[in-house]
Image (cartoon, rainbow, N blue to C red):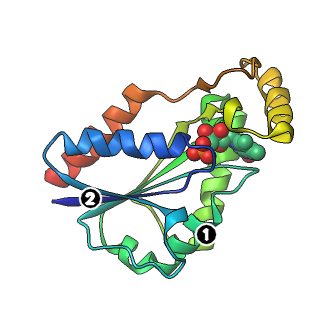
Amino acid sequence: MKLLILYGSTEGQTRKIARFIADRIQAKGIMVDVVDAASVKPDFCLPLADAIIVAASVHLGSYQSAIQHLVTANRDVLQAIPTAFLSVSLAAAGDADDLQDVKACAERFVSVTGWMPGRIEHVAGAFRYTEYDFFKRWIMKVIARQHGQPTDASQDYELTDWLALELFADEFIGQLEA
Ligand SMILES: Cc1cc2nc3c(=O)[nH]c(=O)nc-3n(C[C@H](O)[C@H](O)[C@H](O)COP(=O)(O)O)c2cc1C
């Protein structure tokens, strides 16, 4: 069996999540290719795989445009095999209204790309203050304050639930093997 993980990441948390899942799956003896959407051309054809996980993060209500283009261009391949979409955001760690907002982002993504993932997981991301420029840092501190999250910008804060990701990876592989 061979898996592909295609990801888009602006500040690096989704990259970390993609590699974490790849490590978990590789530890079971399964081959995994990890592709950064930003490192390939827009007409890139996804390599053959038995299943594909796409991961992307939300910025101002949208996912990375490179992911959107690649998923749209490779929709037929994605529709033909088991898939999952990991939507990484801060809203995933918020209340029911926040979650509703980010679910709407994922629905828009499905509607724009025409790809219906086998499953959609909402994964909490991180405040990566050390990666932000002045303006982003200021905005993110305002958002953090509004949501009772840390505002000390001298360090990053991960809200990602790594145990939940392990369970996701195990379940996804379990279903493929069943
Ligand atoms: C400029 C900016 C805009 C963001 N917009 C949203 C948003 O609209 N909704 C949300 O839930 N999270 C938002 N986030 C949080 C990111 O989704 C979160 O930090 C995620 O971990 C980023 O993943 P990445 O490091 O892989 O890019 C935003 C973050 C930044 C820096």
The residue located at (86%, 40%) in the rendering is 135
The residue labelled by disc 2 is: 3
Q: Position of residue 33 (x, y in %)?
A: 30, 59
The residue located at (62%, 44%) in the rendering is 11
Element marked by disc 1: helix
Q: Position of residue 92 (x, y in %)?
A: 60, 36
The residue labelled by disc 1 is: 111
* 10 Å crowding of disc 1: few (<14), some (14-19), many (20+): few
The residue located at (85%, 28%) in the rendering is 142
The residue located at (66%, 21%) in the rendering is 155
How far separated are the C-alphas under marks 2 and 1?
Answer: 25 Å
Mark in front: 2 vs 1: 2
Element marked by disc 2: strand
Q: Position of residue 122 (x, y in %)?
A: 53, 42
Q: Is residue 176 above or below residue 97?
A: below
Name the amino acid, label 1. Ser
Q: Earlier in the sequence, mark 2 or mark 1?
A: 2
Quadrant in the picture for residue 45: bottom left
Specify whether 102 is left or right of 78: right
* 10 Å crowding of disc 2: few (<14), some (14-19), many (20+): many
Is residue 46 something that shows in the picture?
yes
Quadrant in the picture for residue 1: bottom left
- Report the front residue among 49 and 36: 36
Q: Position of residue 129 (x, y in %)?
A: 71, 30
Q: Quadrant of ligand 1?
A: top right
Specify whether 129 is left or right of 5: right
Name the amino acid, label 2. Leu
Q: Would the CB of label 1 be found within 8 Å of ligand 1?
A: no
